[in-house]
Amino acid sequence: MAKFLIADDHPLFREALKAALQAHFESSVFVESDSLDSTLMAIDTNFDLDIILLDLNMPGCENYYGVIRVCEDFPTIPVVVISASDSAQTISQTIGYGAKGFVSKAAAIATIADAINTVLNGGTWIPQELHDQINEISEEQKSIAGKVAELTPKQFQVLKYLQEGQLNKQIAYEMGVTEATIKAHISGIFKKLDVNTRTQAVLLVEKLQSGLQG
């Protein structure tokens, strides 16, 4: 019997995936989450999870932060990313940031089950047709990922607003907090990313999506 965490913000997809997997993994237990915050909480309260099926772009997970954070915080629980974003570069970076497998949301349930079984048995799963196109991430990206993993979800949310060019006042309004709180978050971001300016912080996190080795 395996215990799954299905982390996806679309309830219909979660229900469909759970129903389909029950036919392949009898007597299994399923836990669900719909954001990064609820995913981290679910992992904290379910110490006996066997595997995490993680959506790449649900709330809080953008720019690979979700997979980076989960893999860094819970290295003993294998993660399989199930996403509609299934380019070779996306898969390369997903695996590079710690996931043990990647499956497209368009894949047949039998393929998803094969991927899960492979990962549960200690292997890594990549779509067969893309094997030759998968590259390693750069050492710089690995270093940046380690720094980004130290950001709290609130700090990463502030960083996303910085990427959009928003001012402290605007960010405070969007998040429903004071400007002083935003300034404190930004100071924390600078310290953890080892940068001194907003521009440096934004450029650093943008490198998470580029710079693959050939």
Image (cartoon, rainbow, N blue to C red):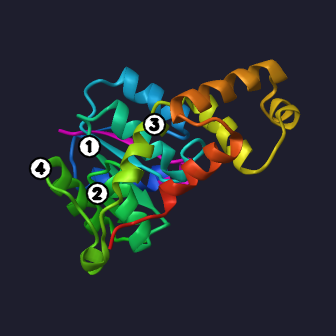
**Lower position in the chain sequence, tag 4 or tag 2:** 2
- Reading the image, the residue beneath label 4 is 121
Please name whichever residue, 156 or 125, is drawn nearer the observer in this view of the structure: 156
- Reading the image, the residue beneath label 3 is 147
Callout 2 amino acid = Gly
Alpha carbon separation for disc pair 4 and 1: 10 Å
- Reading the image, the residue beneath label 2 is 101
Please name whichever residue, 29 or 156, is drawn nearer the observer in this view of the structure: 156
Task: Give the secondary structure at mark 4.
Answer: loop
Callout 4 amino acid = Asn
Q: Is residue 4 visible?
A: yes
Q: Is residue 19 visible?
A: no
Q: Quadrant of residue 155?
A: top right
Task: Give the secondary structure at mark 2.
Answer: strand
Please name whichever residue, 178 or 38, is drawn nearer the observer in this view of the structure: 178
Q: Could you say where residue 63 lies in the image, as x and y percent from the top left?
A: 54, 52
**Lower position in the chain sequence, tag 3 or tag 4:** 4
**Lower position in the chain sequence, tag 3 or tag 2:** 2
Q: Could you say where residue 170 lies in the image, as x and y percent from the top left?
A: 86, 37
Alpha carbon separation for disc pair 3 and 4: 30 Å
Alpha carbon separation for disc pair 4 and 2: 12 Å
Residue interval drawn in magenta: 1-13
From the viewer's perspective, is residue 135 above or below residue 68? below
Q: Is residue 40 left or right of residue 161?
A: left
The residue drawn where x is 61% and y is 25% is 188
- Reading the image, the residue beneath label 1 is 78
